[in-house]
Image (cartoon, helix red, strand yellow):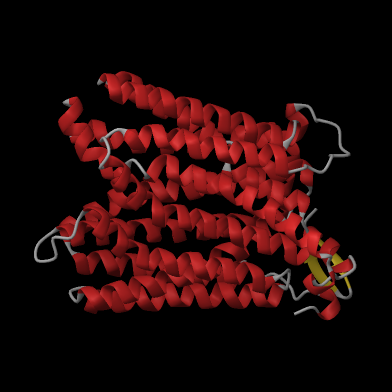
């Protein structure tokens, strides 16, 4: 694996295969084929959106859990943390199973576990049993492990060239859209009854399950399942050959999401305090501003990059530069709420430029037999970045907000340096821009 020579350029194998295949423009495709493709995109994008809804929709009702169930704030926070940690640990297992069996089978089984455990959590909340709720949330984390990361690998199996980057950009946008709407939706549902978000989530899960069953046909693998020992050795060989850029790419993606969720946590806390005192649905609307920057940019960059290596590199450098500069400016301007929201939106736009490029490079860097594990390891690090962002940002905020933004600006600068030095996709063969 690794890089293969094509028209005097060294290309990642997935990209080289794409470049050598006939180019087909969207305008030359029959209308029914376009519609079928977009139905598939939407079905695949529903999987990461469901993943986000199952977690973030519960954030607004955590204070209600404390008062209605008689638990501590720490116990309520574990409803989110245990889910994320369980998912992060089991994502590589789901990746291996998807390589050994089929992506679709793992996604469907995971969605079924995810939704069923959601009903169990809702019943636990209805009965006032924290033990049932927390057990169900751990099971949901187990189910979540086989959703979005495996959907990303499935995109790499099904699509090539511009279609692959387009689908991955849409998946990243769906992930961001879920983050935009989930706190607002959770707050609105809680107006009916405080535990309504628990029961609403399985409905979304069922819709995604139906869409995957009816709309997605998985390409058949021509390779036979490998013994576990051989599989692990081959994964090790992938990292020996490509680890010089894969590992930095993993770290960059994790750092980007660590920063994104950390600054959103900081902004959420800031909005609730005087003199702003913004809470509930209104706070969700304000937090949606930087997230909308992420969503729109991720979708557009996915459509624009195709499999053009030079364009990917440019987008990644511009994105990380935008994050670095905006976060550095926040060191001096964070006290002005309007300027702070503007700077955080610019930082989120930078994240939207970065992530679809990383997703496309990582899914296209390995053959199908190892893609599930590689994308899962990447997703696992992303999960850890999301999970540790809020507590570390809370700790830094208690010490100094200047220190907070100085630290994240330095981290963003470090990620920018890694992009420049380590992640160097070559120009696409064939001259496609």
Specify whether 113 is left or right of 137: right
The C terminus lies in which quarter of the figure?
bottom right
What is the x, y in percent for residue 149? 59, 45
Is residue 12 in view? Answer: no
Specify whether 427 is left or right of 94: right
- Residue depicted at x 80% and y 74%: 27
Specify whether 286 is left or right of 118: left
- Residue depicted at x 66% and y 74%: 304
Question: Residue 64 or 71: which is nearer the viewer?
Answer: 64
What is the x, y in percent for residue 169? 61, 62
Indicate the quadrant where residue 257 lies. Answer: bottom left
What is the x, y in percent for residue 238? 73, 48
Indicate the quadrant where residue 93 lies. Answer: top right
Question: Residue 219 or 259: which is nearer the viewer?
Answer: 219
- Residue depicted at x 40% and y 71%: 347
Is residue 252 in view? Answer: yes
Specify whether 340 is left or right of 57: left
Total numbered labels: 0
Residue reaching furthest to the left: 274
Question: Residue 256 or 241: which is nearer the viewer?
Answer: 256
What is the x, y in percent for residue 370? 73, 43
């Amino acid at each position: 694996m690794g890089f293969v020579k094509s028209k005097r350029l060294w290309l990642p194998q997935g990209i080289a295969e794409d470049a050598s295949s006939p180019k087909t423009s969207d305008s030359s495709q029959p209308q029914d084929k376009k519609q079928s493709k977009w139905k598939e995109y939407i079905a695949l994008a529903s999987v990461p959106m469901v993943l986000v809804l199952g977690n973030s929709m519960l954030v607004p009702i955590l204070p209600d859990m404390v008062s209605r169930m008689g638990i501590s704030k720490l116990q309520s926070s574990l409803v989110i943390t245990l889910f994320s940690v369980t998912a992060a640990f089991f994502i590589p297992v789901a990746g291996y199973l998807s390589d050994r069996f089929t992506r679709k089978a793992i996604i469907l089984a995971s969605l079924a576990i995810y939704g069923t455990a959601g009903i169990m959590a809702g019943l636990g909340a209805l009965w006032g049993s924290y033990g049932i709720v927390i057990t169900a949330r751990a099971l949901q984390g187990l189910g979540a492990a086989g959703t979005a990361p495996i959907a990303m690998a499935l995109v790499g199996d099904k699509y090539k060239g511009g279609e692959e980057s387009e689908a991955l950009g849409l998946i990243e946008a769906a992930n961001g859209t879920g983050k935009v709407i989930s706190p607002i939706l959770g707050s609105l549902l809680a107006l009916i009854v405080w535990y309504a978000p628990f029961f609403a989530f399985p409905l979304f899960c069922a819709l995604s399950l139906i869409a995957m069953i009816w709309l997605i046909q998985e390409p058949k693998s021509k390779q036979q399942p490998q013994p576990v020992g051989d599989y692990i050795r081959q994964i090790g060989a992938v990292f020996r050959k490509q680890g010089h850029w894969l590992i930095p790419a993993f770290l960059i993606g994790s750092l980007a999401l660590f920063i994104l969720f950390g600054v959103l946590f900081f902004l959420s806390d800031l909005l609730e305090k005087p003199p702003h005192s913004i809470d509930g649905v209104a706070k969700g609307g304000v937090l949606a501003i930087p997230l909308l920057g992420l969503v729109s940019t991720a979708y557009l960059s996915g459509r624009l990059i195709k499999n053009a290596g030079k364009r990917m590199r440019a987008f990644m450098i511009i994105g990380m530069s935008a994050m670095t500069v905006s976060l550095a400016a926040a060191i001096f301007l964070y006290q002005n709420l309007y300027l702070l929201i503007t700077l955080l939106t610019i930082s989120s736009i930078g994240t939207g430029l970065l992530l679809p490029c990383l997703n496309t490079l990582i899914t296209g860097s390995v053959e199908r037999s190892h893609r599930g594990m590689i994308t899962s390891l990447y997703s696992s690090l992303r999960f850890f970045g999301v999970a540790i962002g809020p507590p570390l940002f809370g700790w830094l905020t208690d010490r100094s907000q200047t220190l907070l933004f100085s630290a994240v600006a330095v981290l963003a600068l470090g990620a920018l340096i890694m992009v420049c030095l380590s992640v160097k996709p070559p120009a696409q063969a064939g001259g496609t821009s």
